[in-house]
Image: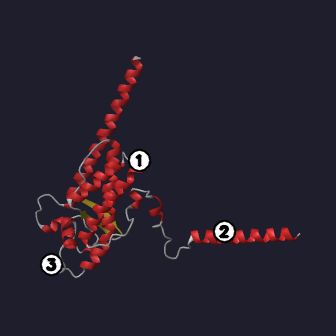
């Protein structure tokens, strides 16, 4: 019995140690993201772009990039506003995915830490310092937390909440939100979701092929039956 209690205490200490290391790593990542996004001692608006190396974003980054995307047309002078918005669509998608995944992982570890205001998102041209409004960022994180303790049956309500938050973000940024863009984060949805799955451009419609094959096999079987009847 004594050995059992000693073993339980040892396992508990190991668990606490692992959790402490995880929390320290998360805090370190948040600090690193913040330092890379805004250098210490810099208060200018341009400093918010620190961390953006992709030249296609014209030096914009952080909250300044978000303000550029959400400002009324013509309020922020840049010749490539539409192009930047087009490029930012994938950055925004990845930002949402990372915040959600972070919340899910934290929920599994039993911790709750605020998501970093700025995230460094890798792009094909380098990286971009991406910023999201705190309200939406925290909402996505909380949905990720709840996803970690929810079963597939509870995904429907979470999916609805996530879609509403993302719809607000995309509307503010002036970017079209494609249906089921974040469906992979909360899979499921029954027959209605299945209708959204379409073959990619240039990809053969496998379902149609199967149906055609089935009809051919059915027709072949009837031919055999007719031959047998005539024998």
| Residue at the image position 11 percent from the left and 66 percent from the top | 44
Q: Quadrant of the N terminus?
A: top left
Q: Quadrant of the C terminus?
A: bottom right
Judge whether 78 appears above or below 206 on screen: below
Extreme bottom residue here? 79
| SS assignment at label 2 | helix
Question: How far apart are the alpha carbons under marks 3 and 2?
Answer: 60 Å
153 left or right, relative to 174: right
Q: Which of 126 and 228 is in front in this view?
A: 228
Question: Looking at the image, is mark 3 or mark 2 nearer the viewer?
Answer: 2
Question: How far apart are the alpha carbons under marks 1 and 2?
Answer: 36 Å
| SS assignment at label 3 | loop
Instruction: From the image, tell me which residue sits under label 3.
Output: 75
Instruction: From the image, tell me which residue sits under label 1.
Output: 151
Of mark 1 and mark 3, the one earlier in the sequence is 3
Q: Are marks 3 and 2 in contact (CB under 8 Å)?
A: no
Of mark 3 and mark 2, the one earlier in the sequence is 3
Image location of residue 172, percent across then percent down: 23, 69
Category of crowding for the residue at label 1, using alpha-carbon neighbours closer than 10 angstroms: few (below 14), some (14–19), many (at least 20): few
| Residue at the image position 38 percent from the left and 65 percent from the top | 181
Residue 214: give its label.
2
Image location of residue 137, percent across then percent down: 25, 57
| Residue at the image position 56 percent from the left and 72 percent from the top | 205
Judge whether 9 appears above or below 106 on screen: above
Image location of residue 29, percent across then percent down: 27, 51
Category of crowding for the residue at label 2, using alpha-carbon neighbours closer than 10 angstroms: few (below 14), some (14–19), many (at least 20): few
């Amino acid at each position: 019995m004594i050995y059992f209690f000693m073993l339980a205490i040892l396992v508990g200490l190991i668990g606490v140690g692992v959790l402490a290391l995880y929390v320290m790593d998360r805090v370190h990542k948040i600090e690193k993201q913040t330092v890379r996004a805004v250098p210490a001692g810099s208060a200018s608006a341009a400093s918010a772009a620190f961390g953006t190396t992709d030249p296609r974003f014209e030096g914009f980054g952080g909250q300044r990039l978000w303000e550029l995307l959400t400002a009324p047309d013509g309020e922020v002078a840049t010749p490539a506003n539409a192009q930047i918005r087009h490029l930012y669509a994938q950055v925004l998608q990845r930002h949402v995915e990372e915040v959600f995944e972070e919340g899910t992982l934290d929920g599994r570890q039993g911790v709750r830490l605020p998501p970093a205001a700025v995230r460094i998102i890798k792009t094909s041209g380098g990286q971009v310092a991406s910023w999201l409004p705190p309200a939406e960022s925290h909402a996505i994180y909380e949905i990720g937390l709840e996803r970690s303790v929810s079963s597939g049956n509870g995904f429907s309500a979470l999916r609805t909440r996530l879609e509403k938050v993302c719809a607000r973000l995309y509307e503010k940024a002036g970017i079209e939100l494609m249906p089921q863009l974040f469906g992979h984060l909360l899979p499921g949805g029954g027959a209605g979701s299945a209708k959204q799955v379409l073959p990619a451009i240039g990809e053969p419609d496998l379902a149609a092929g199967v149906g055609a094959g089935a009809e051919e096999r059915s027709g072949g079987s009837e031919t055999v039956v007719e031959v047998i009847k005539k024998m």
